[in-house]
Image (tube, rainbow, N blue to C red):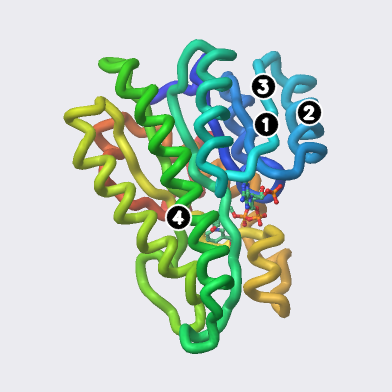
Amino acid sequence: MYSFSEKVVLITGASRGIGAALAKAMAAEGANLCLVARDADSLRNIAYDVRRHYANDVMPRACDIRDAHRVEQLIKDCVQRFGRLDMIINNAAVLGLMAPIHEYSPEQWNSTIATNLHGAFYVSHYALRHMKQQNPAGGRIVFVSSSVGRTLRAGWGAYAVSKYAVEALMQLIALEGEQTGVIACSINPGGAATAMRRLAYPNEDPSTLPTPEQVAHGFLNILRLPDKALNGRGFNVRDYLGGPS
Ligand SMILES: NC(=O)c1ccc[n+]([C@@H]2O[C@H](COP(=O)([O-])OP(=O)(O)OC[C@H]3O[C@@H](n4cnc5c(N)ncnc54)[C@H](OP(=O)(O)O)[C@@H]3O)[C@@H](O)[C@H]2O)c1
């Protein structure tokens, strides 16, 4: 079984929702964390909480993942601070415009693709360059997917396309693992009571949904699997919500 103890994990979109819950759950298992999002204040608060409850090293870093140069620097700083990088969780995303394709403007399209696909590519690309040098220790690149990244639904626009593309990016990284020593997988959280979910389903009662903490528990159950069982696979959190935390 994979252990998080002393591992260095970089989580994007860690300022709230699933990313923030993942940060706390991984810290509880002994991981050291680099927490990334644009909202510096929220990141600082989460880093403070994590340090107070667990003795982990936490580096909060405000960074817009749409900016390739800033992402390159982020990975350099993370490696310099911790000496290595064991896992990336590509979790940051925006919902963007929920509308049929013919209603999209190019700007609306680009803005969602820039975060959900290009941002995940930049983070994975610069992390891979480092993880490849760590071979044979290698590393793990995890993509947070969505149900619409596996079965399209009308009206989900650039978000759905970005999640399909992220699944393809994951598959490529997994196929190239023999050269890099890096494995990749994707995880679909399913519905979770977060800000993004409220945007997508404004009339839904959030108390009927799993909390981000419950979803994070499912993520960890998946990520405890050994590398071979993860590589190239797409998981659903709902299949892993039970079991030990
Ligand atoms: N909640 C659900 O029901 C559900 C279902 C399926 C899939 N998902 C997926 O789960 C992941 C987490 O979603 P969530 O529900 O927790 O969403 P959320 O509460 O809206 O959080 C999104 C996170 O992404 C960060 N982010 C957005 N744009 C960014 C950028 N340009 N640079 C850096 N960080 C950025 C946000 O931080 P800042 O605003 O501070 O930058 C925030 O921390 C996403 O990949 C989402 O697609 C969620």
Residue with the most extreme top position: 83
Disc 1 residue type?
A: Arg
The residue located at (60%, 39%) in the rendering is 22
The reply to whether residue 55 is visible in this rendering is yes
Disc 4 residue type?
A: Leu
Can you give x and y, in whole percent of width and height, for residue 67 in the image?
56, 44
The reply to whether residue 1 is visible in this rendering is no
Where is 10 relative to 240, above or below? above
Q: How far is mark 1 from mark 3, CA to CA?
A: 10 Å
Name the image quarter holding residue 210. bottom right
The residue located at (63%, 73%) in the rendering is 200
Q: How far is mark 1 from mark 4, CA to CA?
A: 20 Å
Q: Which residue occupies the foreground of this view, 107 or 191?
A: 107
Disc 2 residue type?
A: Asp
Check whether the beta carbons of the residues at disc 1 and disc 3 lie within 8 A of each other: no
Disc 3 residue type?
A: Val
**Residue picked out by circle 2:** 49
Confirm if mark 4 falls within 8 A of ligand 1.
no
Q: Which residue occupies the foreground of this view, 23 or 160?
A: 160
Check whether the beta carbons of the residues at disc 2 and disc 1 lie within 8 A of each other: no
